[in-house]
Amino acid sequence: MDTVDQKLDEMLNGLAYEKIVGDAPKSESDPLLAKLKSLGSEIWVDTGELEKAQDIWKKEMTALTTNNTLANQVVQSGIMDQIIEDTIRKIRDEGLEITDEELILEVGFVINCKIALRLVQAFKVKVSVELHPSVSRNLERTLHYGRRYFNVCPEFFIVKVPLTPEGYLAVRKLTQENIPINFTLGFSARQNYLAARLSNPDFVNVFLGRLNQVVIDHEAGSGDQVGEKVTLATQNALIEAREKYKDVQSKLIGASIRSGEQVAFLAGLDVLTIPPKAIKEFQESRKKTNEVISHLKEEIVPGIKISHPLAKRFPCLWEMPDQFISFVDILINENRLDEMQGNELVDFCRKYNINLFHNFTDTELKQIYDHGKIPCLDNWSESIALDDLMTQSALQSFTKDQNALDDRIRSFL
């Protein structure tokens, strides 16, 4: 790292840093949330907005998650405007040579830290902070920012890294450095099994609500329990991996939860990260505690029409073929694994006919970006795996929200 970059990093980490003071708030217990906890589930709140978290906070809640979309909601409220102005001024006062785009990226780093630190100050719990999407395909920059976020608040920050080829490899290194990682944007059991074996992050994810929605949007069925089936299959795969391999510790987060009913159905999952609206639905559902039970060992029949032309694209989300497990074994034993780059991981997958990483062109990425977070499957070849397409759609959706956040920063330049 050259002197200018090192000076900039030190200054920005100083701007982002806040000393955590005071004690955790005293909170009431909730019987239904206590039942989830007794079944083995951690309960996290999925919001970057302090006031929404305070409105529903209970004793059983142990962490919060933020992402690019949630951070943008906070920034667009105007609450971070003064921090944006102050950060830009201090960077320019240092006289460092930095482009406007680099400046925006660094101001975004400070803002993300400040949003997360507001939550840490209020609740004294772990908070996930997500990297800027523009670094998601750059191994070295992912490592750079992952380390910087952690250094701002090592006691409470969990670094969220998106699922890309470079992400898998960066998380492997960051985990070896004992940096807590939330490996995000997962949509299948196989994606997360690979993450647990290859990278061993603290947490992996299934964005289950979006999986239900993609079925509904294509009139391929009711969509009921599609995401739930994938989530429970992933949880069972991780339990087996943790039992079989002593170096695997990854826990599963059920993310993109849309309703209180989903919260109840996923009781027993390692972690549930729940938006305030769904938490309230669960609390107000009038369920009795004995009605909240684990469904981990049940056979789930998802709401997909078997006769629908798209039906055959969905099983890859929950199936774990022996061929794939064998591929992971081969990859883990690859001599050059720790020197591997993202493109080399892609090539390795293709060598063994593993369709995890389609080579999307710039035109295709723009098509995904413009369409939204739920892809139109009719536009994409069956050779593109659904989990891969869903991950790319999620990443492009977060990129769109990050661009809106960046534009607000840009307005101050």
Image (cartoon, rainbow, N blue to C red):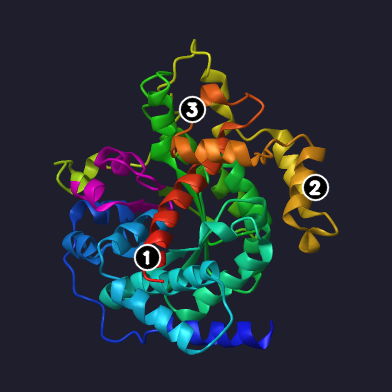
What secondary structure is found at the residue carrying circle 2?
A: helix
Q: Mark 1 highlights which residue?
A: 411
Q: Is residue 318 rendered to the left or right of residue 39?
A: right
- Magenta residues span 255-280
Vertical placement of 106 versus 278: above or below?
A: below
What amino acid is labelled 3 in the image? Cys
Residue at 67% x, 38% y is 358
Q: Is residue 91 rendered to the left or right of residue 225?
A: right
Looking at the picture, how far across and down is residue 98, in whole percent? 57, 77
Query: The C terminus lies in which quarter of the figure?
Result: bottom left
What secondary structure is found at the residue carrying circle 3?
A: loop
Which numbered mark, 1 or 2, is in the foreground of this view?
1
Whole-number angstrom distance, CA of label 2 to CA of label 3: 34 Å
Q: Mark 3 highlights which residue?
A: 376
Q: Is residue 52 rendered to the left or right of residue 334?
A: left
Looking at the picture, how far across and down is residue 363, in whole percent? 61, 37
Q: Mark 2 highlights which residue?
A: 330
What secondary structure is found at the residue carrying circle 1?
A: loop
Looking at the picture, how far across and down is residue 181, in whole percent? 53, 64
User: Does the image show residue 249?
Assistant: no
Looking at the picture, how far across and down is residue 390, in whole percent? 52, 38
Whole-number angstrom distance, CA of label 1 to CA of label 3: 33 Å
Residue at 44% x, 20% y is 304
